[in-house]
Amino acid sequence: MTCVPWGTLESVGDQSGYVNGINMILSSSIPVLESILSPIYFQFFLDKLASSVGPQFYMNIFKCKQYQKLEPYIL
């Protein structure tokens, strides 16, 4: 996401195709894993998934540079 030329895009929606793709993959894969794994292992998998994806997601968001530097408003 840090390599996306945000300044050249006409609009940025609430959700990109990238996010939709991840959602589609997870929503089709998670029920299959739940049926294969025992409840204890499935919960362990979800905990590990959340603890690894969450921090990486936030780290990549904070790597993004500001689009426009805001100047302080002076009266």
Image: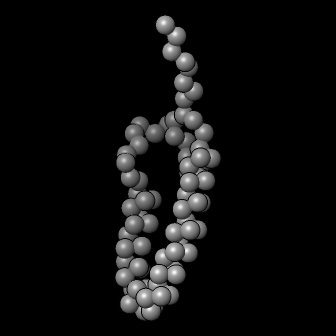
Q: Residue furthest front?
A: 40
Tell me which corner region of the image, top left, top right, bottom left or bottom right, holds residue 48: bottom right
Is 46 placed above or below 70 here? Answer: below
Give how far across and how far down residue 41 sits, in percent. 50, 87
Tell me which corner region of the image, top left, top right, bottom left or bottom right, holds residue 19: bottom left
So how many labels did they put on this image? 0
Is 61 placed above or below 43 here? Answer: above
Tell me which corner region of the image, top left, top right, bottom left or bottom right, holds residue 51: bottom right
Q: Residue at x 56, y 49 (%)?
A: 61
Q: Residue at x 39, y 66 (%)?
A: 23
Give how far across and how far down residue 26 sits, in percent. 42, 73
Give how far across and how far down residue 17 sits, in percent. 40, 57
Q: Residue at x 46, y 39 (%)?
A: 9
Depth check: give the residue in front, 30 or 9.
Answer: 30
| Residue 43 relative to residue 20: left or right | right
Q: Residue at x 41, y 43 (%)?
A: 12
| Residue 59 relative to residue 41: left or right | right
